[in-house]
Image (cartoon, helix red, strand yellow):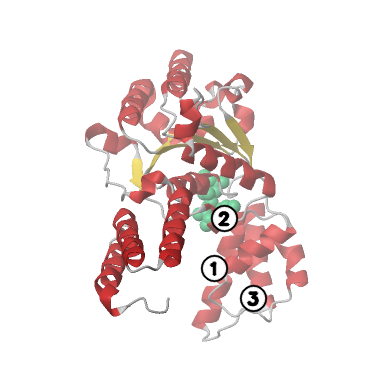
Amino acid sequence: MRGWSLAASADHVKALVKAHAAGDEEGFYAVALQMAAKAARQGHNRLAAELRDLIDRAKVEQVPERVSPTPVIRPKGELAELVTAEYPRIRLRDMTLSKTVHEALQRILHEQRQRARLESYGFEPIHRVLLVGPPGTGKSMTGAALAGELGLPLFTVRLDGLISRFMGETASKLRIIFDAAKKTRAVYLFDEFDAIGAERTAVNDVGEARRILNSFLLFLDETRPESPVVAATNHPQLLDRALFRRFDSVIAYDLPDRGQAKEVLRRRLQIMDTTKIDWPAIENHSAGLSHAELVRAAESAAKGAILRGEESVSTAALIAALDERANARRE
Ligand SMILES: Nc1ncnc2c1ncn2[C@@H]1O[C@H](COP(=O)(O)OP(=O)(O)O)[C@@H](O)[C@H]1O
Ligand SMILES: [Mg+2]
């Protein structure tokens, strides 16, 4: 950058920092482009080209929707009673996932991000997703991570709660949610989705159970491809097989294997000194626990150490916390 006067660009640098602080990505790149133009005017063509190239690449990798800050959408009126809204910041990389699940989720994100390209050829991105697997393996978290990745709000509907709260009116309440979904781009997470399975719903009225299911299926057909619908269930056996076919992608979650269990523990213990932990000794004690249980055990061990004024978590303390989780599970 010899000869390129930094002093003359002080305003640009200030503008860059301001744009960054405000989360104004568009503004940030606009300033960067001005800097490139200025460099070109000063005869620094290589620098100008490099800058433009960097900006182009950064923009391509960006989700278009994240370029402008997400407007804050709050569910209003009756909708506010039916769904919870969040703006998750979590990302896929914050999760510990098997290769298969990770790839399936990456594919959804890729198709969603390249939606315009697919649509110009008459294709729709994957947007109806069913997550099945044991409790505590990250299904609900995935709804949040997809929203976080796509820069969209997450609207969560707990179907068990909805059904027990509204009984005979559930289908009409779902309709309110679905109508809103057509207007508001978001990730819609239908949690505890098995509650919709006709056999074991809290609804005794078989007719109503059918209506709930049918109205959900209709919704799946009508839903906009840019608003992913994620249904999650711990009890896939309660669901009609025919229902599975209505989803673009069915992803099976599982308990973590040894490597994944270690990763979950390590990540949760990141702020602590874990160099003394004998990981092979931990393995037997983490087997069979879900990601959520491992996180809780790590938290409990970390808190114990902190309160004892220690900076490192010991193998014995971690094993005790894991065993406590395993015992709680057996009760
Ligand atoms: N795959 C995972 N990777 C990292 N943490 C996880 C994972 N699965 C679960 N957790 C932890 O456990 C908590 C509960 O998980 P959750 O997504 O509600 O599980 P599920 O919906 O499958 O029952 C999460 O908030 C997170 O702290
Ligand atoms: Mg869940």
Q: Which residue in the structure is indicated by mark 2? A: 95
Asked if 293 appears above or below 276 in the picture, the reply is above
**Residue at image location 42% in from the left, 25% down from the top:** 223
Q: Which residue in the structure is indicated by mark 3? A: 317
Q: Count residues near mark 2 (Cα–Cα under 10 Å), then give few for <14, some for 14-19, many for 20+.
A: some
Residue 331 appears anywhere in the view = no
Q: Nearer the viewer, residue 117 or 273?
A: 117
Of the numbered discs 1 and 3, the one sitting upstream in the chain is 1
Of the numbered discs 2 and 1, the one sitting upstream in the chain is 2
Q: Amino acid at mark 1?
A: Glu
Where's residue 144, x and y in %? 46, 48
Q: Which residue in the structure is indicated by mark 1? A: 299
Secondary element at tag 3: helix
User: Which numbered mark, 1 or 3, is in the foreground of this view?
Assistant: 1
Q: Is mark 2 within 8 Å of ligand 1?
A: yes
Residue 51 appears anywhere in the view = yes
Of the numbered discs 3 and 2, the one sitting upstream in the chain is 2
Q: Amino acid at mark 3?
A: Ala
Where's residue 213, x and y in %? 48, 20
Cα distance between the residues tagged 2 and 1: 16 Å
Left-right relation of 58 to 197:
left
Q: Count residues near mark 1 (Cα–Cα under 10 Å), then give few for <14, some for 14-19, many for 20+.
A: some
Secondary element at tag 2: loop
Return the residue found at the far front: 43
